Image (cartoon, helix red, strand yellow):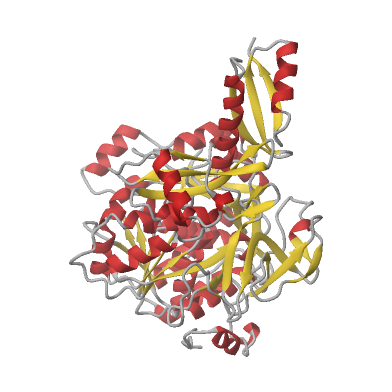
Amino acid sequence: MPHIQTPIRSLADVEALERVPLAQRDLPPNTYELLRRSAERYGDATAICFLPQGVVADVPWKVSYRQLFARVTQAANAFHRLGVRPGKAVSFLLPNLPQTHYTLWGGEAAGIVNAINPLLEPEHIAQLVRAADSQLLVTLAPFPGSDLWNKVEALRASLPAQCRVVVVDPVKQLVEPQRSAVAAQRGPLPEGVLDFDALLDDCPDDRLESGRVIAPEDIASYFHTGGTTGAPKLAPHSHANEVAMAEIMGLFTQFSPTDVVLCGLPLFHVNGVIVTGLAPLMRGARVLLAGPLGYRHRPLLHDIWALVERYRVSFMSAVPTIYAALLDIPSEGRDLSSLRFALCGAASLPVEVLRQFELRTGVQIVEGYGLTEGTCGTSCNPPEGERRAGSVGLRLPYCETRIVVRDSTGAHVRDAVTDEIGQVCLRGPTVFRGYLHMEACADHWIEGGWFNTGDLGRIDAQGYLWLTGRSKDVIIRGGHNIDPQAIEEILYRHPAVAMAAAVGKPDVRVGELPVAYVQLKPGAQADEAELIEHAANQLSERAAVPKNIWLLEAMPLTAVGKIYKPCLRMDAVRRVLQHDVDAMGIPLHIDVLPDERHGQKARLIGTLDQGGRAALAEKLGGYAVHLEWVDTH
């Protein structure tokens, strides 16, 4: 059945699409069948065009739709031979490679695929491997410039006994004489480790040896949430979740076989996997896999406009920090006419960044909103309709969105009226059923199967969703809610500011006070006083003027480039407590860490007698922070 292209310009268009129930859209029952259909339809057309370094000078490595499905089938068979069954997981710790796609979809055909962020620490990775009940860990073989194997070596002893290690060997992708030189320097693969490509080569590519019939409700994948520190939560996605999300994103983007989709976000994240992976592959588009490190590779950003021009890229997806960084990359003289639009998600895009980006490049950015628990996207500004700057757009087809007002105990009071701020709740075929291994997750749900995202927002009269912050991100000063985004927007207007993030610092009298962290543009100069004055002159809400603005050499980011506010909130607590300790003349060092029970805890490190402890406990007791003593005597 050919894909019907109907542009979404308004909420009426969304509702018109929904007159055809999703069940009547002839969707494949699982992701394996999705790729089989694409192989039949698009055959020798290029599915993945891989750039080994992510730069314009690369000689691309092309994988056709037929080859992709064959390799996915071989991966599923190899994993099955190694003991993977439905309900058991294949974990992977890989950069963006064609083999990552083989692992993703082959893992889902054999059992469950568990995507892990390679930037995590070894003990954190091992925790996720164990939590997923993994039979295999697929990772990168030892290779110059990569620390992945070092991490795997550090955690191998803590892996489940049944968990085998399989490696993708980048040496095979090198040309001579580099291939022989690197292989000789490294030596043979570590003992007991299996070679990914050799395993696949030994398996049939025309059938699943397991004979498995994959039901839509079967779990396909686990994606972890929770940033780069703290206890992660595993969000299970069913095959039906992922297929529905691919179809819905296709309805929105109108991908076709003429499209070239740039993938620079990591393939352990739902945006990279669905928006620049499964959705274009469902519709015959070409995925330009822009290097193993994607946007984290600075040369890719430097070459991005040349890549758009050379490969006639029609769509890209990134996060606000990437678009802010691209403001420093000249686009003059480049033909960017193929780029229909660029999608921005993961965090609110500062209006000033959007304005400058579009002014300099002529490329339209559309803001969207989604989350791992919803498989990826939930809403987006319509590329061919009205874009409302600062809004995350209209709900996507079949993605129900509701704003709920709750009382201080968290109980549902009523639905919000138009433009009233409340909790953003979701329901629909892409919303997961709950976290893995989390019995106490009832607070995330309200009656009727609605998932409470934890985000605050409002819906206007035309159906546009406006996020006003996360419940935990709102700065509460003496019972008054301060929107951190309002502070950030003002700071982004300062010509020296590259990145800005506002959080609350603890205060004994009013609970929290607003502070901000700023990363300056390269070569730019500004100090705390100048930036505070800038904010004070433009913020209409006096209570929102930051009490401190701290300059950072580099903002803490998640692996997809989103500013990681939990790290900043912990740093703000550390600074406040350390200031009080120093003022008392007490030689203690303070660390603030995430804590599963208390949210965060402050470790007071040093030697202190009982009287000193009592005095300090009294001084710090006014803060809502759990204290832990670490005696170094």
Q: Is residue 289 left or right of residue 203?
A: left
Location of residue 388 in the rendering, given as x and y in whole percent from the top left corner? 48, 74
Q: Give the tally of numbered discs.
A: 0
Q: Residue at x 39, y 40 (%)?
A: 146
User: Along the line of sight, which residue is nearer the eye, 163 or 554?
Assistant: 554
Query: Can the viewer see residue 266?
Result: no
Q: Is residue 47 left or right of residue 597?
A: left
Query: Can the viewer see residue 229?
Result: yes
Q: Residue at x 63, y 46 (%)?
A: 232
- Which quarter of the picture shows residue 214? bottom right
The vertical placement of 163 against 574, above or below, is: below
Which quadrant of the figure contains the C terminus? top right
The vertical placement of 333 against 633, above or below, is: below
Q: Residue at x 47, y 78 (%)?
A: 382
The vertical placement of 408 against 137, above or below, is: below
The vertical placement of 342 against 27, above or below, is: above
User: Along the line of sight, which residue is nearer the eye, 64 or 400?
Assistant: 400
Q: Is residue 266 left or right of residue 185?
A: right
Location of residue 441 in the rendering, given as x and y in whole percent from the top left corner? 76, 54
Location of residue 513 in the rendering, given as x and y in whole percent from the top left corner? 60, 43
Location of residue 552 in the rendering, given as x and y in whole percent from the top left corner? 42, 38
Q: Residue at x 58, y 26 (%)?
A: 578
